[in-house]
Amino acid sequence: MPTLRARKKAARHDAFVDAARRLVRERGLDGVTVEDVCDVVGVSPRTFFNYFATKEDAVLGVPVDTAIGAPQTREAFAAGGPTGDLLEDCGRLVAEILAQDEEGRDELAELLELVHSEPKLLVRHLAWMETQRRALQDLITRREEVRPSGVDPVVTATTVVAMFRAAVLTWRGDATPGHHAPGDPPPDATPATEAGSAVVRCAPHHVPGVSGSPEDAVTHVLAQVRRLAGGTIHQQEAQGAP
């Protein structure tokens, strides 16, 4: 059970996020300063920077400490555990990250709308994703020295990031596969930000048999990845072909 200090810290983190998002919805990102957010929360900018590096990070909910999983989880993974199966262990890492994220379905939808409407948020979001991918790559590289899999850490890390996104869509979604939320890319979008915008707009979807827990979502995604890796989809298509 979290300590009183941890609960207070989490509550203040949420207060910053809520204030930042509300102000950005009302004024636009450029019309909001860190001081504005602090005035709403009732703290000083110095306190704000203990939680977030920028106002963009506050809107996205990206804390100063963006380490992947708990320290003991990272160390167990780097040592070749907890199961010894690379894909399974990557899945467990994703499940822990999802379990730590308390964004609800409505909050996620609101955030995606903000990211879509504010190109600067999209750029920051994509930069954060790349930072996480690099951190994963370093962690996987450490693991490969202890328990070699023969898979390029770059490929593994990129796959894990994709697994995380797929698990999020499965866990929190209620739309249909392939459906996109309303809206077009920002008028001034570059090819890169337009592609990124399409990624963020991709709507979650409901999967029969997935109850809504992070573990269920990750189990579903792992099964799909194993099917792809094993070529079973191709085999089934071949068997069904005339």
Image (cartoon, rainbow, N blue to C red):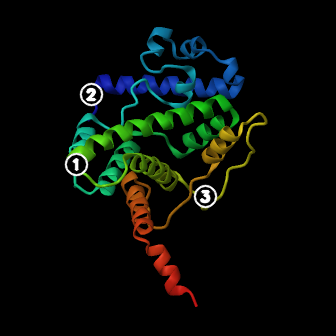
Distance Cα–Cα, label 1 vs label 2:
31 Å
* x and y, in percent, of residue 109 in the image: 60, 43
* Residue beneath disc 1: 80
Q: How far apart in space, not on screen, are marks 3 and 1 (Cα)?
A: 37 Å
Q: Badge 2 is on which residue?
A: 3
Quarter of the picture holding the N terminus? top left
Q: Earlier in the sequence, mark 1 or mark 2?
A: 2
Secondary structure of the residue carrying tag 2 is loop
Marked residue nearer the N-terminal end (3 or 1): 1
Q: Which residue is mark 3?
A: 175
Q: Secondary structure at mark 3?
A: loop
Q: Nearer the viewer, mark 2 or mark 3?
A: 3
The residue under the point 31% across, 56% down is 88
For residue 98, side relative to residue 83 (left or right):
right
Q: Position of residue 17 (x, y in %)?
A: 52, 27
Q: Residue at x 53, y 61 (%)?
A: 206
Which label sits in the foreground, 3 or 1? 1
